[in-house]
């Protein structure tokens, strides 16, 4: 009885180990490739995102430039990375950064009313893949 | 249409698990399941009481009058900080102590502690501490031991706790998400105050211990997970029991099944509302809007409907398996059988929590122990010199999050199967009948695990 139990536990451990090895090998083959520069441009007209919210993606390590042209005073905000820039009405502003953290991040424009943030307009969901 | 705003406590969401990992994980689940079926043990190992006292000195060091008083005071103090920060602090949810403490540190962290160290929440529970102080005070005043004025209606069982879980999830996932600015710290403070009043009133009516065991949502919820851990304090003495063994005696109260089903259902809903169900929620919201409900109300009604659907779906999968099991000779009635197998879902509930909130918890704790600790009100104070800290989103790689998610689901699956098998042997005696009944539970577990994997693989929308 005891030996059977030990064998079973061993079996499960071997199985788990095999799977982990497979996953690591599989995952390892996916990575590689150099980083690149990417630019994304958005426009805010009358306080609304032109074309609605977009899905954009990048690879970890990419150098990203996010540009916003707006006809109202707004703050461009990249969540997670916590980068923000105030842009005056009729102006274009941009934020450049290296996408070093993976995950999905919201890019928002906060309409500035008397310098205070109003609830944001979603410009894009940025997926940074490994 | 209004966008799902999230609680905005942290500004990042997990990437969906890639297809190849989904396929591998599903394959592992199936292989592990057949493996589990083939390595049947023939004697029940978890039903017996295996508790034995730990060393006298360690027990006396950890469990005594002083620690009892201190932990109770810490619990009450933390409750006070939540109320104070929520009421007096900034209304930006991510910069106020209250939302992150309640929904990340307390709600998720206490589960982690419970699974590792047992029912620690019992010691820190502020409502228990106040309830005991109340009973003690009345005892001193009248000179006779305090007796609660009402008898708890036994038929209610743990229904109040199950409904409390739904209410908690509703506050975070639906009420909070319906506000574009996120769940307001003010609302967290009000909800905390209301819950405190409700819990204390119930304890004053039915007795502290009676309510803690059945109605106090968090005691029941964390207590459920603590049943997986070896440490247990019994009559003031710390001891150890076999891991998982105490879970077999958890579902003694009525409606315990629904506590664990709701626990899985609300996590599944949170995962599904951003992927699988997001389209359905949006179209329902729009349809209700056309009927004339306001946008916020439409969104809340649609989300509430799908929250209940999620809980119902989890319940349906479980009960389908239970009904299937009754076809095996020598089975108890359906209701009894459901109660007998309810505890096998506890590891699944834990696996769902880990899979959905692991990274959220890690990143949230970076905020909790830096700027939220030093500046709980978000007004620029710096009590411990950590107010300039920030969340490092590179702390976890995408791959490590995926492996933890998939690993949690597979481990939960195997543990659930083990608990179910052990219980089946205890019920049916005959190993052959037991294994026949377990084909049904195997289907249930495979459904839950594959659903969990599927939710993780759906991209956020």
Image: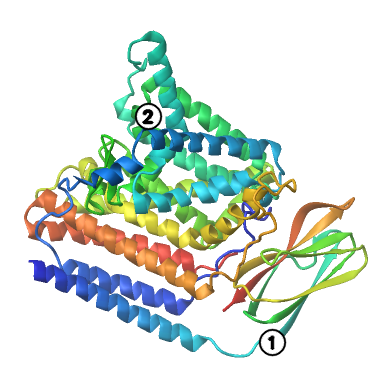
Labels 1 and 2 in the same subunit: no
The disc numbered 1 marks a residue on which chain? A
Please identify the residue farthest to the front as the structure is shown: B57
Percent from the top left, x then y, of residue B46?
Answer: 18, 52
Q: Position of residue B144 (x, y in %)?
A: 33, 11
Residue beneath label 1, please?
A: A36
Q: State the residue lying farthest toward the right.
A: A90
| A17 relative to B134 in the view: left or right | left
State which chain disc 2 sits on: B
Can residue A52 be spotted in the picture?
yes
Secondary structure of the residue carrying numbered label 1: loop
From the top left corner, tell me how far across and down residue A123 is, in percent. 74, 65
Quadrant location of the C terminus of chain B in the rendered image: bottom right
Q: Nearer the viewer, residue B284 or B54?
A: B54
Badge 1 density bin: few <14, some 14–19, many ≥20, Cα 10 Å: few
Instruction: Say which residue appears at 70% left-offset and 37% top-offset.
Output: B88
- What crowding class fits label 2: few (fewer than 14 Cα within 10 Å), some (14-19), or many (20 or more)? many
Q: Which residue occupies 64% across, 50% down? A: B384
Please state if B415 lies on the left or on the right of B401 as rendered.
left
Residue, x 67% and y 36% (percent of image)? Answer: B87
Secondary structure at badge 2 equals: helix
Residue B291 visible, this orientation: no
Left or right of B414 on screen, residue B458: right
Q: Is residue A125 above or below residue B211?
A: below
**Residue visible at 47% across and 26% down?**
B200
Give the side of residue B380 with respect to residue B403, left or right. right
The residue beneath circle 2 is B211
Q: Nearer the viewer, residue B141 or B4?
A: B141
Closer to us: B80 or B412? B80
Residue B435, percent from left and from top: 14, 60
């Amino acid at each position: 009885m005891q030996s059977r139990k030990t064998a079973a536990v061993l079996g499960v451990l071997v199985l788990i180990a095999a799977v982990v090895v497979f996953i690591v090998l599989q995952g390892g083959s996916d990575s590689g490739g150099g980083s690149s520069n990417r630019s994304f441009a958005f426009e805010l007209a009358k306080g609304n995102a032109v074309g609605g919210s977009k899905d954009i993606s990048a690879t970890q390590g990419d150098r990203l430039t996010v540009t916003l042209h707006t006809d109202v005073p707004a703050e461009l905000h990249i969540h997670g990375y916590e980068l923000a820039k105030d842009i005056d009405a009729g102006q274009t502003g941009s934020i450049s950064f290296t996408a070093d953290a993976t995950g999905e991040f919201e890019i928002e424009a906060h309409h500035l009313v008397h310098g205070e943030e109003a609830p944001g307009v979603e410009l894009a969901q940025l997926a940074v893949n490994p | 249409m209004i966008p799902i705003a999230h609680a905005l406590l942290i500004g990042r969401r997990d990437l969906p698990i890639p297809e190849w990992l989904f396929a591998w994980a599903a394959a592992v689940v199936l292989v592990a399941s057949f493996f589990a079926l083939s390595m049947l043990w023939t004697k029940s190992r978890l039903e017996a009481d295996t508790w034995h006292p730990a060393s006298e000195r360690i027990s006396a060091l950890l469990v005594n009058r002083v620690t009892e008083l201190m932990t109770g005071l810490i619990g009450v103090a933390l409750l006070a900080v939540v109320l104070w920060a929520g009421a007096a602090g900034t209304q930006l949810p991510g910069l106020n102590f209250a939302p992150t403490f309640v929904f990340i540190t307390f709600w998720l962290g206490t589960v982690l502690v419970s699974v590792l160290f047992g029912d620690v929440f019992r010691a820190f529970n502020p409502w228990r501490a106040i309830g005991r102080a109340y009973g003690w005070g009345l005892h001193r005043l009248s000179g006779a031991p305090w007796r609660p004025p009402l008898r708890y209606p036994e038929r209610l069982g743990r229904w109040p706790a199950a409904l409390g879980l739904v209410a908690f999830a509703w506050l975070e996932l639906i009420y909070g998400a319906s506000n574009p600015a996120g769940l307001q710290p003010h609302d967290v403070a009000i909800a905390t105050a209301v819950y405190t009043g409700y819990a204390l009133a119930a304890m004053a009516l039915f007795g502290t211990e009676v309510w803690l065991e059945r109605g106090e949502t968090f005691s029941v919820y964390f207590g459920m997970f603590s049943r997986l851990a070896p440490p247990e304090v019994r009559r003031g003495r710390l001891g150890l029991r076999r891991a998982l063994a105490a879970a077999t005696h958890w579902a003694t109260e009525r409606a315990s099944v629904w506590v664990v089903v709701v626990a899985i259902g609300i996590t599944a809903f949170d995962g599904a509302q951003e992927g699988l169900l997001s389209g359905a929620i949006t179209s329902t919201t729009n349809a209700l809007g056309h009927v004339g409900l306001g946008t916020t109300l439409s969104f809340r009604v649609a989300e509430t409907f799908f929250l209940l659907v999620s809980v119902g779906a989890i319940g349906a999968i479980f009960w389908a398996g239970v009904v299937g099991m009754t076809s095996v000779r020598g089975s108890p009635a359906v209701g009894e059988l459901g109660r007998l197998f309810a505890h096998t879902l506890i590891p699944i509930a834990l696996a769902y929590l880990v899979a959905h909130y692991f990274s959220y918890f890690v990143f949230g704790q970076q905020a909790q122990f830096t700027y939220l600790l030093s500046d709980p009100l978000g007004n620029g104070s710096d009590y411990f010199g950590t107010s300039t800290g920030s969340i490092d989103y590179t702390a976890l790689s995408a791959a490590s999050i995926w492996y933890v998610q998939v690993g949690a689901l597979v481990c939960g699956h195997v543990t659930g199967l083990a608990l179910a098998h052990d219980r089946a042997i205890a019920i049916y005696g005959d190993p052959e009948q037991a294994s026949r009944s377990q084909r049904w539970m195997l289907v249930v577990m495979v459904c839950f695990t594959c659903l969990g994997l599927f939710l993780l693989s759906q991209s956020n929308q």
